[in-house]
Image (cartoon, coloured by chain):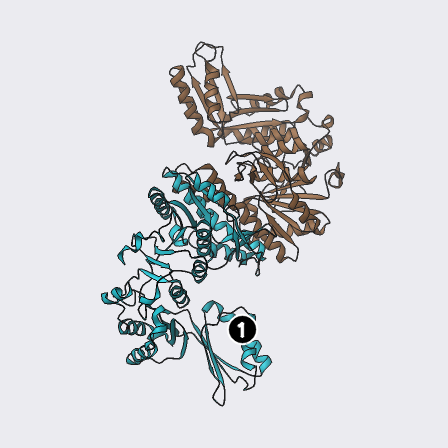
Chain colours: A cyan, B brown
Amino acid sequence: MGALAQDDALERDTVVLKFGGSSVADAERIRDVAARLVAAREGGRRVVATVSAMGETTDTLLALARRVAPNPDARELDMLLSTGERVACALVAIAVHDLGHEAVSFTGSQAGILTDAVHTRALIREITPVRVVRALEEGRIVLVAGFQGFSRETMDVTTLGRGGTDATAVALAAALGAACEIYSDVAGVFTADPRLVPDARRLEQVSYAEMLELAASGARVLMLRAVELARAHGVPILARSSFSDEPGTWVHYVEEMEQPAVSAVTHSEDVVLFSVEGVPDRPGATAALFQAIAAEHVNVDTVLSDGGSASPGLSFATAHDEAAAARLAVERAAAALGALEVEERRDVGSVSVVGAGMRSHPGVAAKMFRAIDREGVDVRLVSTSPIKISVLVDRSAVPRTVRGLHAAFGLGEEAAEGTAN
Amino acid sequence: MGALAQDDALERDTVVLKFGGSSVADAERIRDVAARLVAAREGGRRVVATVSAMGETTDTLLALARRVAPNPDARELDMLLSTGERVACALVAIAVHDLGHEAVSFTGSQAGILTDAVHTRALIREITPVRVVRALEEGRIVLVAGFQGFSRETMDVTTLGRGGTDATAVALAAALGAACEIYSDVAGVFTADPRLVPDARRLEQVSYAEMLELAASGARVLMLRAVELARAHGVPILARSSFSDEPGTWVHYVEEMEQPAVSAVTHSEDVVLFSVEGVPDRPGATAALFQAIAAEHVNVDTVLSDGGSASPGLSFATAHDEAAAARLAVERAAAALGALEVEERRDVGSVSVVGAGMRSHPGVAAKMFRAIDREGVDVRLVSTSPIKISVLVDRSAVPRTVRGLHAAFGLGEEAAEGTAN
């Protein structure tokens, strides 16, 4: 399937390119981004780009707001944080002008990105990119400030929360009938993290379903939210590096019949394991615990309920930045349910195998646990989806678990590529 | 006239407060500004505030843009620079919320500040503060991002150039029928710079006409542009310190009959003196030189034409940041007029006496030159207006010239205050 890059269904007339904060961290990188936009324009395509705030700008602004007030007002936080992307967009537009091309930058509101009125985590409702389309028709390169929109109801600026700039890019691409290219410091989707697995290969393509699982289980290439949007609207995404010309990985509708059982091994160290002992053995007790967690908006990743034993226990994993809220929730539940003993462990990590072909290959789990066993690694928690199996292991065992699984499923071999495509 | 502060014509129901960049330079100062707004609100007034960008933000953004491209596109520069004031406004609003009051921040466009479409130095055309008025009616403290507006014609963000935040405050006050308080690091208008003249007194009030001359001749309290706007719309301005509770100076319509001849002595070291020799002695030669200067948008302050001599010379003064453009203009004129010899001197300063009563006191100039002569100071250039006389002297002679004039006109004496009010 070497002809993939020439596929007309993927290479559309209009392209929305997205660059993260590290790609626009200083004047030189901003000029690099501008050069890339000009190259795409000179290649004959209509070019839109969304960029994140420069480097650590958003974190710096947030820290400043917290020095001003411990709990900043959400509407004003959006007024504040939305400036970071505007700065980056204006600077890229300035750099494009300097290269002799016409460019224009728009705020989220000027670009017609309408959201609900939920400040700091607004959802995109509709895109009416009238000014974007007009500027494209005039031959301009269009910059759109990522991560933001505005609410027609309140006429206020909103921000989209985590992954907001990726979501902006995909939503714009959907509205414009465009393809989307998302640039980051990773050159695409790999069969495993190349820093752990020297023979890890870049995948030429993955399906939306696989990408969702990969993003959820540690692949840093794309944000879950953008992949969901892309799947819903059929937007093809090319994930590639802003620091090289490697071809990247296409995320799109993939004919799954010919997929191998396993496409990639991912891992994450952003895991905190909670083990709760002494949950009363009566109906509704576990539900009450998870209701308390849900009330704190904590995403619980992996759950193991030990309901069969005399003293029932329950384990769940969550991300580091949600651990404090999770602990709070468990403590609240403790007050309601009677004393619970809570253990919190941070010396753990998760390793997952992901593959759209997995559902039709029943032997995947058996093969996976044989490989883990061969490495002498203890599994603390298991969770599965139709196309993913995750295990929680000691942090120190993550690298050899990844390497063992990558070898066991033959992901480093050229033969695997042949099977996949 | 001690009852001035209770004057109902000055203390209106609504007040627009303006804070410069140094007043919002860090989290602590932002909290101080918020406390001042809350105090004004709790005093029963409706409160609007415009703030500049924090500290050196605007200069930092401008330097960044120039690293990206030597001549940044003007529209994009406005997109870039307008973010600084939005950040500051949002942070002040966050601080007001934290003090238990409702606040809302608006961009220039949300506040209805309509300008022409001349980027980086737009002029305010109209203010339609619908959202500001509604928020005030809801009891909120309203923050408006200074220095910016938007063009209805292009729907683009514009910035107002130098003095733009002061102009925003005065224009808003005019639209709202409000008084205006402009906070800076100076506690009002003084009879001379207190750093040079220990017995300099704060003036309780000055007329618009006097303030225009004071601002033009070195007083850093208010920007010329804001004073012009205030005079045109009859907006009373209180100039005061953001770092103290001193009462400040009112700028408004002052009954001039009782004014003393001279209100204050000002000085400026922001002066470059150009002396041009060899201007051809034919009609239009001097005009051609000044046309060339005007084409570079250089403001020429003081002009002395030595038209009577055999080899006509011409001198003019300009501000430091316009000196390069002035030199360019003179060199262009040289090409057209034949060789000119240009001397550029930076070791000079200007000293001015300003007073609305001056026009009815013919002895002011004579008294002034006697005092300068007593100090043994050479005058290089003189310029006058109906209410101002300026002299250009050696930089080193500025302090003793200021002190000599302050004493000669009796400005430090309590008696002067009595006469003035």
Check disc 1 and report the residue beneath it: A293
Percent x, y for residue B83?
A: 51, 46
Left or right side of A396 for B147? right
Percent x, y for residue B73?
A: 44, 37
Percent x, y for residue A194?
A: 29, 64
Chain to which the residue tagged by mark 1 belongs: A
Quadrant (top left/top right/bottom left/bottom right) for the C terminus of chain A: bottom left
Above or below, A294 relative to B12 = below
How many marks are shown on the rendered structure?
1
The secondary structure type at the circle numbered 1 is helix
Residue nearer the viewer, B312 or A406: A406
Above or below, B91 relative to A416 = above
Q: What residue type is labelled 1?
A: Ile
Category of crowding for the residue at label 1, using alpha-carbon neighbours closer than 10 angstroms: few (below 14), some (14–19), many (at least 20): many
Residue A43 placement: quadrant: top left
Residue B170 placement: quadrant: top right
Residue B303 in view: yes
The residue located at (41%, 76%) in the rendering is A383
Quadrant (top left/top right/bottom left/bottom right) for the N terminus of chain A: bottom left
Above or below, A87 relative to A362 = above
Residue nearer the viewer, A357 or A59: A357
Above or below, B246 relative to A421 = above
The residue located at (37%, 59%) in the rendering is A251
Percent x, y for residue A56?
A: 44, 55
Left or right side of B250 for A23? left
Residue nearer the viewer, B256 or A289: A289
Q: Which residue lies furthest to the left in this view?
A: A414
